[in-house]
Amino acid sequence: MTPRSWVPLLGIVVVLLAACAVSVTAQEAADPGVLRIATTTSLRDTGLLDELELMYENTSDVDVQITAQGTGQSLDTARRGDVDLVLVHSPSLEQQFIDEGYGINERCFAYNNFLIVGPESDPAGIANMTPVEAFQAIYLAGTNNTPDVSFASRGDESGTHTREKEIWEAAGYNYTTDIQDSGAWYLETGSGMGETLTLANQRNAYTFSDIGTYLALQDQLALVQLVTEGDQLMNRYSAIAVNPEMAEGVNIDEANNFIDWITSDETKEFIGNFGVEEFGQPLFIPLYPPECTEPPFNCTTCSGQGNATTGNATA
């Protein structure tokens, strides 16, 4: 064989070696000893997340690495393949994530409620209204420059912000044209729940919060609970694994292990007791079948099943 005849063969070998290198790199990226989670700030701000992280690391010998963001940011992080699973609380955004093929093995594990909180003086007079009535009253008072009426929004596309926008829509307003930039009464913090509650407290403003974060920070706040009832205030939390077919380096095995663990009866019992001693009530209420599959929760399931490893798996 002449030297020139080696050239095509050499090219084939180089391509094969490059393919092998890419495969090895992708495999190495999925470190079996590391679990990367993107999660909502409300789980962090309540202190529950720190406890769950410690518990799982002690039982699994896995290094849990957590990024706390709003739900929208967490799902975008997952789309980039930078985490293995998400813990989030926005059913509409979660369903979009699953429909796009990025999310698999979705399991609900707990819920609590949203609240509308504000100054005890309640200048817009919203106490005990429905969420829709309260938002209408705040809007009318704010846009009419009623003294001391303002509303602090997270403004960060989180699960809490998404639900806030849904209530504005139910109240008859277009969020983009009627609410945003509608005056000094409406503030967007672009921050997590804890920071937004702190700002609302400083400004003596109304805000929309999950009850867990509010109770965890209550001692630092002068804000009081004003609207606490209504179907639109239900706040469901889910765990969703990232589809390894959509992102290289996803540790799907450990993601599924964690989902089985957080939906186990033992972990749910811990979640249900968290906060009772300090606040006199749980910050989160665990979900069990068949209740979780029925309205208003509408989960596919809330029991640990795992092993959903492909984009064709149903959550």
Image (cartoon, grey):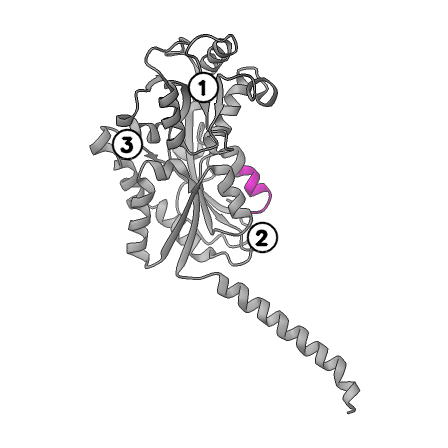
Query: Which is more N-terminal, label 2 or label 1?
Result: 1
Image point (34%, 43%), residue name? 49
Q: Which residue is mark 3?
A: 282
Horizontal side, residue 76 vs residue 278: left or right: right
The disc labelled 2 sits on which kind of residue? Met
Callout 2 secondary element: loop
Q: Which residue is mark 1?
A: 151
Callout 1 secondary element: strand
Query: Which is more N-terminal, label 2 or label 3?
Result: 2
> At which x and y percent is residue 213?
34, 31
Is residue 101 on the magenta stretch?
yes
Horizontal side, residue 40 vs residue 94: left or right: left
Q: Disc 1 to disc 2, how far (Cα)? A: 39 Å
Residue found farthest to the bottom: 1
The crowd level at tag 2 (other Cα within 10 Å; few <14, some 14-19, many 20+) is some
On screen, residue 41 above or below 105: above
The crowd level at tag 1 (other Cα within 10 Å; few <14, some 14-19, many 20+) is many
On screen, residue 13 above or below 114: below
Horizontal side, residue 69 vs residue 180: left or right: left
Quadrant location of residue 211? top left
> At which x and y percent is residue 167?
50, 21
Stretch in magenta? 95-102
The circle drawn on residue 246 is 2
> At which x and y percent is residue 78?
51, 47
The crowd level at tag 3 (other Cα within 10 Å; few <14, some 14-19, many 20+) is some
Callout 3 secondary element: loop
